[in-house]
Amino acid sequence: MAISNRSTTAVPTLVLTRENIPRNIVQLALPAVMENLLVTMVYLADTLLIGRLKDPAALAAVSLGGLFLNIATQLFSATSVAATTLVAHAWGSAHYEQARRIATQAILFALLFAIGAIALMWPSASALLALMGASTRAIAMGSMYMRIVLVASLLGFPMLVLNGIMRGAGDTKTPMTITLVMNVWHILLATLLIFGLGPFPALGLSGAAWATASAQLLGGFLALFLVMSGKRFLKLHWREIFSWDGQLMGKMLRLSLPTAGESLVMRLGFTLFMRIVSALGEIPLAAHQIAVNVESLSFMPGFGLSVASTTLVGQSLGARKPELAEESIRSTMRISIVLMGAIGVIFALFGPALASVFGSTPEVLSLAGNAVRIGALEQLPIAVLMVIAGSLRGAGDMRTPMLATLVGTLFFRVPLVYLFAIVFGWGLNGVWLGTAVDWTARATLIYLLFRRGTWRRLRL
């Protein structure tokens, strides 16, 4: 069945011309940056509010429970990237019927994946928390927190894929708006249910869990409604969603697995990395956390430009315009280098001042300030890495970013951080120097692999 042009008017269409590249980048990147900021606030808000209860077990419960829920979220993000890439290629080639078919199969894939994740995590919640060495009380509270949030995950997890579908069509504003609505709802309800304001009972940790669950349910429902109704995508029908397409499902799985593997490697590397940092003692660990909080803000421009690059490259290649895809990558790279290079200069000049905002002892702040200054060395490699990784994913190459992550994590980050921090005795400075070498190695490897140009010849 043909899709008329009127069917696509709900989605802001990108004009794929060389002259319009800067506008397209801004149009796609800014909402993605805001969305990423808002996403980080969901579990952070629970942590901040629960911290006011002055109950260490409750704080440990939400932190550890959130850790495992975030791992599941990262796996769904892999499917979201696959959906974005496939939809972008179909959209760029004006094959709207194919885009709609991809969307229906992505939703079915996400629903089945969500059922499997819930079935796996629900009975194993206590065992997972016990593996982290949590106390008996923290295990009981954390498993309760996880299970309440999992109640809403049948829509909460697929929401990521629904947002990916909209991004593939060039709409990054709607996912941002949905995330904003979720955050406002979540913070208001969590405040009421945790502390028991007005007629609401004080539920403590369970109140935080129900607020998070309801926010995910609200976000999932909004994303599903907007995609299904045709208000932010092509109109879909339920019978199409439950119509199995083995070829598309296989393609979705093939594209999702490398990114899922990349997420798992990153999580494993992070665990080993944090064991090394923890071995340095409480003061370096506290300083490290402050420095990480400062640096995390610098990732936002790179993330937004990576999302923009994925969509632009996918749509340009779908439209059979490889030269436009290359020009989009170059333009996005220039913007990324300028923005993150400027952030690097700020870190180098004002690292201690930025760390002092978080407040702590002079010893902690001194270490954190030095770490932020060393973090300035990471900004340009991260700028290159994020844009090229997003571009390759837009072309359908999920393996090269995974390879760069695997090599960087196992052959640079973990061994070099241990060598510099523990063997050489450089402490926290060694941790951050090793991390800077890791980012540089990843950026160099992915750039060399990107320069081979095999991504131009991929056909999805």
Image: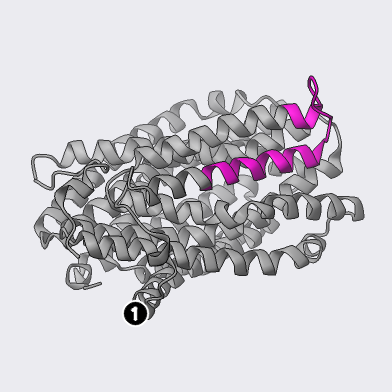
Mark 1 crowdedness (10 Å alpha carbons): few <14, some 14-19, many ≥20:
few
Find the magenta span and give its range.
Answer: 192-220
Please determine whether, in this image, residue 138 is positioned above or below residue 441. above
Quarter location, residue 415 = bottom right
Left or right: 261, with 247 as reference point: right
Residue marked by disc 1: 247
**Which sits in the foreground, 56 or 311?**
311
Quarter location, residue 2 = bottom left
Horizontal and vertical percent position of residue 147: 74, 55
Q: Residue extending furthest right?
A: 136
- Quadrant placement of the C terminus: bottom left
Horizontal and vertical percent position of residue 366: 63, 31
- What is the secondary structure assignment of the residue under circle 1? helix
**Amino acid bearing label 1:** Gln
Left or right: 64, with 310 as reference point: right
Residue at 27% from the left image edge and 51% from the top image edge: 169
